[in-house]
Amino acid sequence: MKIENQPTTDTAVTPFEEALGLLQCVLVARRTMINPEGLSWVEYDTLHLLRQHQAMNPSVIGEKLGFTRSKISKILKLLKDKELIQQEAGKYDKREQVTRLSPKGLTFLQRADSSRRDMADIVASKMSPGEIALFTEFCQRTTDLLSAQTRIEY
């Protein structure tokens, strides 16, 4: 909010920050459109991680996503209640639950994949092969740089 001709921010936003922020908004909006289940970011990230690593113990999921054991337990309970994951007792330690995607969870991620392919098709139709290669390189480098600052490992 602007008060008596004061700027609305303390610092100037660079064109790079503005572009990154706008891209983030568009990606979040598109992710929301394919999410009628109302999954949170952490729930989505958990499903994505499970698809990559198949069956995992909750402690490993929590470690990879940077959550405490109690936080990941709550996330997994929400996903289980939505029937997006399945859990069973561990092979060697019956107290440890092995967690994997359910068929419904896989269907959710396939819907997300389809949306991502649609986005790629839209962008690729307006870029040259060279621009696509550069964009791909920049996206991967950005992901690597930001992932290095967080505990999320994709």
Image: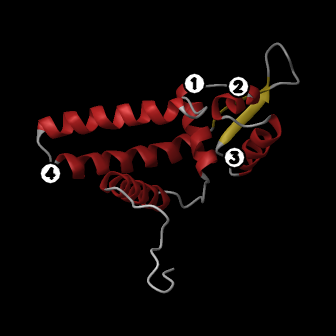
Q: Earlier in the sequence, mark 3 or mark 1?
A: 1
Q: Earlier in the sequence, mark 2 or mark 3?
A: 2
Which of the two marks, 1 or 2, is nearer to us in this view?
Answer: 2
- Looking at the rendered structure, the kind of residue marked 2 is Val
Q: Earlier in the sequence, mark 1 or mark 4?
A: 1
Q: Which mark is residue 60?
A: 2
Q: CA distance from mark 3 to mark 4?
A: 38 Å
Q: Earlier in the sequence, mark 1 or mark 2?
A: 1
Q: Is residue 79 above or below residue 65?
A: below
Task: Classify mark 4: helix, strand or loop.
Answer: loop
- Left or right of 101 in this view: 135: left
Q: Is residue 1 above or below residue 99?
A: below
**Can you identify the residue that label 3 sits on?**
79
Task: Classify mark 3: helix, strand or loop.
Answer: helix
Say which residue appears at 55% left-offset and 33% top-offset.
149
Q: Position of residue 109 (x, y in %)?
A: 50, 43
**Can you identify the residue that label 4 sits on?**
126
- Looking at the rendered structure, the kind of residue marked 4 is Lys
Q: Nearer the viewer, residue 49 or 152?
A: 152
Label 4 CA crowd tier, 10 Å (few <14, some 14–19, many 20+): few
Q: Which mark is residue 53?
A: 1
- Looking at the rendered structure, the kind of residue marked 1 is His
Q: Are marks 3 and 4 in contact (CB under 8 Å)?
A: no
Q: Nearer the viewer, residue 92 or 19?
A: 19
Q: CA distance from mark 2 to mark 3?
A: 16 Å
Say which residue appears at 45% left-offset and 48% top-offset.
112
